[in-house]
Amino acid sequence: MHVFTFKRLAIVLAVMATVTLAAFGEMGRAQAQQAMPSSTPTAASSQFVGSDTCKTCHEDIVNNFAANPHVNATLKVNGTEVHSCEVCHGPGAAHVESGGDKSKIFVFETKSANDVSQRCLTCHQASMSHGNFTRSVHFKNGISCISCHSPHKAREKNALLIEDTPALCYRCHADVKAAFAMPYRHRVDEKLVTCMDCHNPHGTFRTRQLRATAAGQQVCFKCHRDKEGPFLFEHWPVKTQGCTACHTPHGSTNARLLRVYPVNLLCMQCHALTTNSGVPEIPSFHNQAQKYQACTMCHTQIHGSNGAETFLY
């Protein structure tokens, strides 16, 4: 009798274990299905085809794009993570289904300068160097991002420029190109100085898109630190008008990039020979004979002095 009871007990326990395992199995499958994303594409995800699909028609572009920094670009659209081509050109499903209709996708070359720049600023707006582009002179004059940059066929890999500077800048700024051909100039053509050292092409709050103060002296002081001061005796035109009151920043026919030569004619634009002119009078013994025409031979510290208010030392 005991044997029979034990056999029945073993059978009951075995059935209970089987039922319990089956129940846990169903629960596990249900949890797994909840955790896994649905295989049914959403309305947003179905609009995007991926760069592999783009490659079927644009193989050379996609292959070259592998070395481009934009290849790692990602963007979330309604919860869908978009990669590579469609980050910039938008969803490609309609473009593919239409057999390559360009009106079904964002083609940069066919869009207005404003539309192109706004598309690029979707990602680049957060950058400190690009944040003011919509306020820049370039943007207001219809210069878009692809006027200077080419994401696919850049000749200059640095910043994906269509051409190296300063040749790129010279395309529009021909007058500046002429200035850099003058006898006295900043060495921009030799690439010792670049346009971007002084200007931010993407815009600033200052005139001429300068990287520093409107008068420009802070830009100059990056290289000419000995002229910065502060000095006990300041030459006020340097503080109020900046370096460009006396110098031309790009190039000049005069030594030291002076606006006027000889030096005494430059100084006499402010320092008159008569009284009541509002500025220090030129002493009577400075009769403007030849030996007095090089003012800075005596007034050697003309940018500012810690020793003499006449800037003699």
Image (cartoon, grey):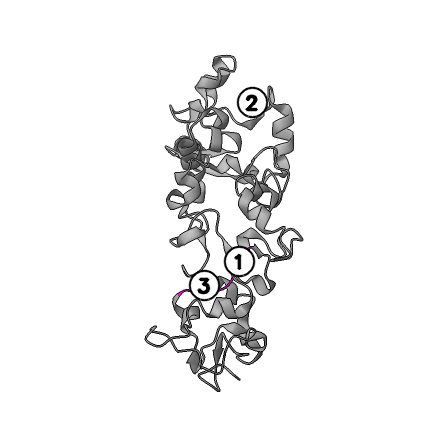
Q: Foreground: 258 or 277?
A: 277
Q: Amino acid at mark 3?
A: Ala
Picture coordinates of residue 278, whole percent (x, y) = 33, 73
Q: Which residue is mark 1?
A: 249
Answer above or below: position of 238 versus 96.
Answer: below
Is residue 95 found inside the magenta-colored segment of the image?
no
In what element is the residue under mark 3?
Answer: helix
Residue 3 horizontal side relative to residue 205, left or right: right
**Residues tagged 1 and 3 counted as in contact (Cβ below 8 A):** no
Mark 3 to mark 2 CA distance (whole Å): 60 Å
In what element is the residue under mark 1?
Answer: loop
Q: Which residue is mark 3?
A: 245
In what element is the residue under mark 2?
Answer: helix
The N terminus lies in which quarter of the figure?
A: top left
- Magenta residue span: 241-250
Q: Amino acid at mark 2?
A: Thr
Q: Amino acid at mark 1?
A: Pro
Inspect this view and state whether residue 24 appears: no
How packed mark 1 is, by other alpha carbons closer than 10 Å (few <14, some 14-19, many 20 or more), is many
First reached walking from the N terminus: tag 3 or tag 2: 2
Q: Nearer the viewer, mark 2 or mark 1?
A: 1
Answer above or below: position of 186 versus 67.
Answer: below
**Residues tagged 2 and 1 counted as in contact (Cβ below 8 A):** no
Q: Which residue is mark 2?
A: 53
